[in-house]
Structures are given as structure tokens and as C-alpha cells.
Amino acid sequence: MQASIAVVVRFRSEAASDVLFAREWYDAQRPGLGDEFVQALEQVIDLVSDLPEASPEIAAGLRRALLG
């Protein structure tokens, strides 16, 4: 049995700012939509942390996961 190793997911400061901006934008479209966006983002972050190899590697040491 292979042990799973969780990884730390890091955000650049620009990405963190983008998330805050996106949350506000989604809330302006429909109240509560920003919270749904953040919840979807948190689910993807958890997935990437728990199963990093589930996301394709787009450059050495860099993987991409899309919100669904």
C-alpha cells in the first residue's frame, strides 16, 4: 500500500488578490455566489493538496487544477 502525502498549496499574493476580487464580482452578480465560488475553490485546493498527481503538470513542479 502506498502512503499518500499531502502537499502544501501556495498562492502568490497576486492570486490571493484575484480571489478576493472574484468573490466580490460574483457577489455583485448574485448575492451568495461569491461564497459558492470560494467553496468551489476550497474543494479544489483540498483535492490538489490530497492528490496532487490528479492534476496535470504544466511545467516542472507546477500543476493546474480547474474549478468545475
Image (cartoon, rainbow, N blue to C red):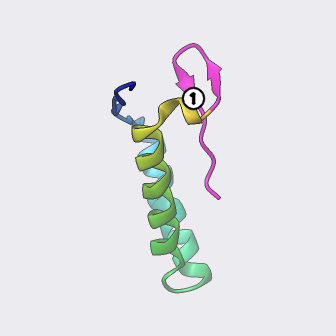
Q: Main secondary structure of the magenta part?
A: loop
| Snapshot quadrant of residue 13 | top left
Q: Residue at x 40, y 39 (%)?
A: 49
> Would you call the spot at circle 1 few (<14 residues within 10 Å), some (14-19), or many (20 or more)?
some
Residue 34: horizontal and vertical position, in percent? 50, 73
Instruction: Give the quadrant of the C terminus.
Output: bottom right
Residue 55 percent across, percent down from the top left: 60, 35
| Residue at the (52%, 66%) spot, across then down | 37
| Region in magenta | 56-68
Q: Residue furthest front?
A: 1
| Label 1 secondary element | strand
Q: Position of residue 30 (x, y in %)?
A: 58, 85
The amino acid marked with disc number 1 is Arg
Q: Residue furthest top?
A: 60
Q: Is residue 26 above or below residue 22?
A: below
Query: Which residue shows up at 57% across the image and 13% down it?
Result: 60
Placement of the N terminus among the 4 image quadrants:
top left
Q: Which residue is mark 1?
A: 63
**Residue 3 relative to residue 66: left or right:** left
